[in-house]
Amino acid sequence: MNGPDISARTILQERARQLARPLAQIVDRNFAVTNATSVLVARLGDERASIALDHIIEVYRTPSLTPIPGARTPVVGVIAWRGRVLTVLDIAHSRSGQITITEATRILIIGQRTAAFGIVADEVDDVEDLNTQEAVPVEDVSPARREFVRGVTANALVVLDAAALIARFAPTQHSTGIRE
């Protein structure tokens, strides 16, 4: 009877040793999971792109987009959103023709704490966890997009830098205080 008790004790000691290993070893083994960022994957023109959920205020379905005559690219129009007029951008790499609002079209409302602008998405695919280390920088990005395209993943997903988009395209806040 001593045999089974010793082997049970040995098994329990081995399990306790495995559970007691330092947390750093566990984190290293799960490195890909710890660097994961939740992103929204959407189709922008002919490409699939991702934007971190931290900077998406809302995925908005709009019945129409009001064009702004003479607006500079990438501004394509404005929408009425929650009592505000919000500028809408088209940052797709390539788009054949004008933007057509369909049942699948969504406006991604982007900002930090408050909405800064919207981005036209031809279709919203899904939310995924993306390891940001997997994005490989792209050499042939157009100068207009270089500052906010982080790279491309192995499955051809363009990784957009939402903070850079906000820094580049968010309207400047003007003081409405009393002038001296």
Image (cartoon, rainbow, N blue to C red):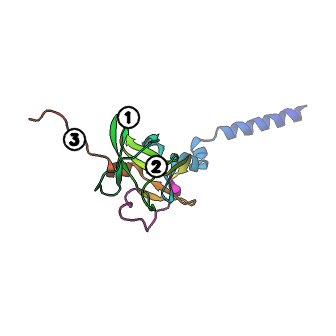
Looking at the picture, which amino acid does disc 1 mark? Answer: Arg
Residue beneath disc 2:
101
- Is 142 magenta? The answer is yes
Looking at the picture, which amino acid does disc 3 mark? Answer: His
Q: Mark 2 falls on what kind of element?
A: loop
Disc sitting over residue 62 in the figure = none
Q: Nearer the viewer, residue 39 or 15?
A: 39
Q: Quadrant of the C terminus?
A: top left
Disc sitting over residue 174 in the figure = 3
Q: Quadrant of the N terminus?
A: top right
Q: Position of residue 22 (x, y in %)?
A: 59, 41
Q: Which segment did they paint magenta?
A: 132-148
Q: Position of residue 33 (x, y in %)?
A: 58, 47
Tell me which residue sits at (58%, 41%) in the image.
Answer: 23
**Which of label 2 and label 3 is nearer to you?**
2
Position of 109 compared to 155: left or right? left
Q: Nearer the viewer, residue 31 or 50?
A: 50
Q: Position of residue 5 (x, y in %)?
A: 85, 32
Instruction: Give residue 140's quadrant in the image.
Output: bottom left
